[in-house]
Structures are given as C-alpha cells and as structure tokens.
Image: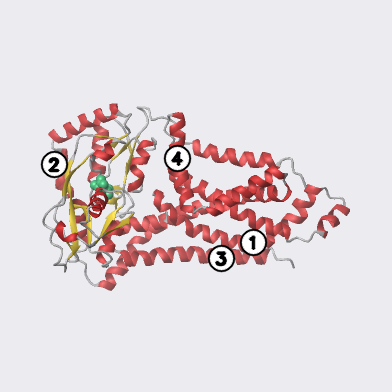
Amino acid sequence: MKSPSLPHLVALMTAFGSAFLLIGCGDHSAEKPLIVGTEAQFAPFASKNAKGQIVGFDIDLINAIGEVIDHDVKIRDMAFTGIIPSLQSGQIDAAIAGLSVTEERKKSVVFSDPYFEAGLSILVPASNTTIQSAADLKGKTVAVQQGATGAKVASDLKEEGRLGSVKYFPSATLMMMELGKGGVDAVIHDTSNSNTYMKLDPGKVKALPEPLASEYYAIAFNPKSTELQAAVNQALKELSSDGTIERLKDKYFHDEEHDPGDLFSEYLSHMVAVLPNLLHGAFYTIGTAGVSEIMAIGLGLALALGRLFGNGPLRFVVIAYVDVIRGTPLLVQILFIYFGLPGLINGITGHPANINPFVAGIIAFSLNGAAYLSEIFRAGINSVDKGQWEAARALGFSRPGTFFTVILPQAFRQSLPPMGNDFITLVKDTSLLSVIAVSEITMEGQNYIARTYAAFPTYIAIAFTYLILTFSLSRFFVWLEKRFKIP
Ligand code: GLN
C-alpha cells in the first residue's frame, strides 16, 4: 500500500520535535529572569533541603546579588560537568557552584571577582596512617569528582608519576561514598564540601592537615556577558562592604556535628524521610515515560508503515534511522539532545538555544522508543495472516480501510506484550535523566544522599519506588492483554 499521507506524517513528527527544541530559543533580555546554573550536590554552597528546594551559601548570595542588580534569579540545577557547556551554549546566564577560578576555565568563560577563599584537601579513611601528605600518594588510588579542580590536580600528579591511579565520579557524594567503602585510598576535593561530609558522617574520614592547593570561588558567565559581569562585581562589592557575605559565612560555616544514633532506626527514618522526595520524583518519571511513550507510539507506527509500505528511499531512511538509534547508547542520545544540539544551534545562529532538561528527555525517549516500537509494530503487522487482506478487499474495503480496521487492531494485539516490556524498560531508563538533572526518582534520591550521605537506606527506597511502579505497570499490561484477547 502506498500511503500518500505517510511522508507528511513523518514530516509532521519531525517538525514537532524541532518545535519542541526551539521552544526555549531566544536571548535573555533585561526583563527576563537571570538563569543561574548550579550543582545542588555541593553543600553548604548548594544542595537540596528536605522540601526539595535548592539552598546554600551560593544560593543566598546569588539571590542577594539579584536584589542589588534588580533582576529575578532562577536557579537551575545541573550536573557539574554540564555547567561550563551550558554557559557556552547560552542555556544559562551565569553559574554559581563553588566554581573555582582556573586559567583553563578562563579560556571558555569569564569570572566575577572571587567571593570565597577555598582550597583542596586530601581525605583519607580515619584509620589511615600511611598517607600523611601529598608525597605519600605515590602508587595510591584516588577518587575525584569529574571536571572538578581536584580531578585536574590528581591527573597532573598521576602524569608526574606521583600518584597511582585516578577514579572519576560524577558527583562529590559518590566519590565520598567510594572512599567510605574503601574503594580508594584517598580523595582530593574541596575542603569546604569535604567538611560537610565529615560532619554528617563523623569518625569515618579525616582530612590531612596540609591543604593541597588554595583556590577562589567566583561566579562564571558567558564571555559575551561582560555587562552582567560588571554589574555582579559591583553588587559583590556592596554585599561585602555591608557585611552580607560575612553573615552568610556565619550562617553556613558553623560547627554542628550530627549524632548518628542506632543504625536500624537511623536507616528506617531515612527511608521515611526520603519518601516525599521520591514521590515528587515519581511524578517526573511517570510524566516523562508517559508522554514519551505516546509520542513514540505515533512515530514508531509511522516508521513501521514507512518500512513496510514506503518507496525505496523512504524505506532506506527508516532502516538507517532504526540502525542509528539502536546502535548508539541512550545516554549518548540524551546528552546529544541536551548539550550537543543547543551548542550547534548556538554556533550557527549565535543565539542561545535553551532546552528544558525535561523536554530534552522526552525528545530523547520519544525518538529512541520510536525506533524500537517500529520494529515491534512491523513484526505485529507482518504476523497478521495475508489472507485477511484479500478477504477484506473481497468485502469491498479499500486498502487503507483494510489496514486500519482489519489489520492494525490485530497487529496491535500482537504487539501488546513486547510493548509492555518496552514501556517498563522506558520507565527504568528515565533514571538516566539524572545526568541532566531532571528531578526524577534517581536524581531526587541522589540529592537526598548528597544532603545526608545515607546511601544504603536511600538506594533501597529508590529501588522500591521503581519496583512499585513497574509492578503496577506489568499488571496493567496483563489486564490490557486480557481485555483485547481474541475470544
Ligand atoms: N571547586 C571545585 C571546582 O570548581 C568543585 C566545585 C563543585 O563540585 N561544585 O572544580
């Protein structure tokens, strides 16, 4: 069957995708709020509180700056490694994330005047006696946070042969947990954030007395935003002279130790405490998976039709599409849509191309799911006995009529079990969106761990939340199969 509307359908779907992508395009004029990127896993500068709000020294400071320069501030949480690319592509106007000023970063972004004197420490297990200074790191394994200054120092030391090997982690929380469980000999990390960790989980880890390096934290901007940089510098001066910055230091750097109490009740209370966050995350997980599945079904069906009934070039395009999507990791596709495409659009048009991480996730899952579903639909359509075409034609049905009223309903029934599998996989795969800081279940859990370092009970609670979701879904698909069963 040659369906003349098919290419139109495919074009429409593509247009839909592009429209979504372009939704956020545009430049940030003075009336628009200042979009400020941060990494909410870096207490006490930026972390999520029990209500899921991003709080900390950096957040108070940027809000105070916003007041001085008369600009609304909108905080956007993102992976640390995404901060500089997001500034470059114009997805954010500024970044405040305990970001250290380095010569290397100055090649890509511009910095405000420093607002905090910081430094790097070497952390070792409390029982360790062999590592007493940087000189003792020779042959040792060290954990660092990807993209952070600690990672740069560690890789330099390794190159000079003064350190054994380096393990890279996407967040400071995970790196600290690796040290806690004995997976590495030491950690190189910001002193201020390390102190928070040591206070939360006392007696496990100690910092060597001698700091490894001294650094300064500053706010970063796109190199073109020199006006904003000047205004922020002026605001920092005012906030320093009126004592605001000192007051913030008093607020966030007080010595308060946490009493761990008995292990079982401690775990239980964490599992209860993290629940509201996980439920909030479930909303995003279900939302992303649900919307993506609907879009993927539409596009997947169009692809299957193209492959089965289209002309040579269309079939070629569909086969190539399915091969490319199936042949590349979903994580790479997500990163490509969130960071790659906006960077390209920015490079071509010179305008910042801002894509919401939630929308980026939906686009990635829809495009990915469509490739897999198209194969499921193709198999479903092919499984319908060819004789039915002739029978329906003999009854006077047109070819499209036969397809939509006779073939497709049966193909759909055949496709239901693999579709169910596919959807459950999709729900679990949404956890990948934590890399672009979508507040889905995994991300919410990780934020809780960053605040409390309670890894075990939180991961149990995360696993349970997914299990409840996927179990309910598999029951739902069983019900659907029964409902559409041929009597
Ligand atoms: N200060 C470190 C850096 O700039 C780490 C910051 C962070 O993890 N948020 O690289």
Q: Nearer the viewer, mark 4 or mark 2?
A: 4
Give the image location of residue 429, x and y in percent. 48, 57
Are circles 2 and 3 on residues that touch, CB within 8 Å? no
As measured in the structure, the alpha-carbon distance from the residue carrying label 4 to the one carrying label 2 is: 36 Å
Label 4: which secondary element: loop
Q: Earlier in the sequence, mark 3 or mark 4?
A: 4
Could you tell me the amino acid type at mark 3? Ser
- Give the residue at x 47% y 40%: 341
Q: Secondary structure at mark 2?
A: helix
Q: Position of residue 170 (x, y in %)?
A: 34, 54
Instruction: Please name the residue that numbered disc 4 is placed on.
Output: 355
Q: Is residue 55 visible?
A: no
Circle number at residue 246:
2
Q: Dot 3 corresponds to which residue?
A: 474
Crowd around label 3: few <14 · some 14–19 · many ≥20 (10 Å): some
Crowdedness of circle 2 by 10 Å Cα count: few (<14), some, many (20+)? Answer: few
Q: Which residue is mark 1?
A: 416
Sooner in the amino-acid sequence: mark 2 or mark 1: 2
From the viewer's perspective, tell me whether residue 16 is left or right of residue 403.
left
Whether tag 4 and tag 1 are in contact, CB under 8 A, the answer is no
The residue that appears at 25% across and 33% down in the rendered structure is 67
How much space separates mark 3 and mark 4, taking CA atoms? 32 Å
Q: CA distance from mark 4 to mark 1?
A: 33 Å
98 with respect to 282 (left or right)? left
The image position of residue 80, as x and y in percent, is: 32, 47
Ligand 1 has an atom within 8 Å of the beta carbon of the residue at disc 2: no
Task: State which quadrant residue 111 falls in.
Answer: top left
> Looking at this view, is 39 or 323 the one in front?
323
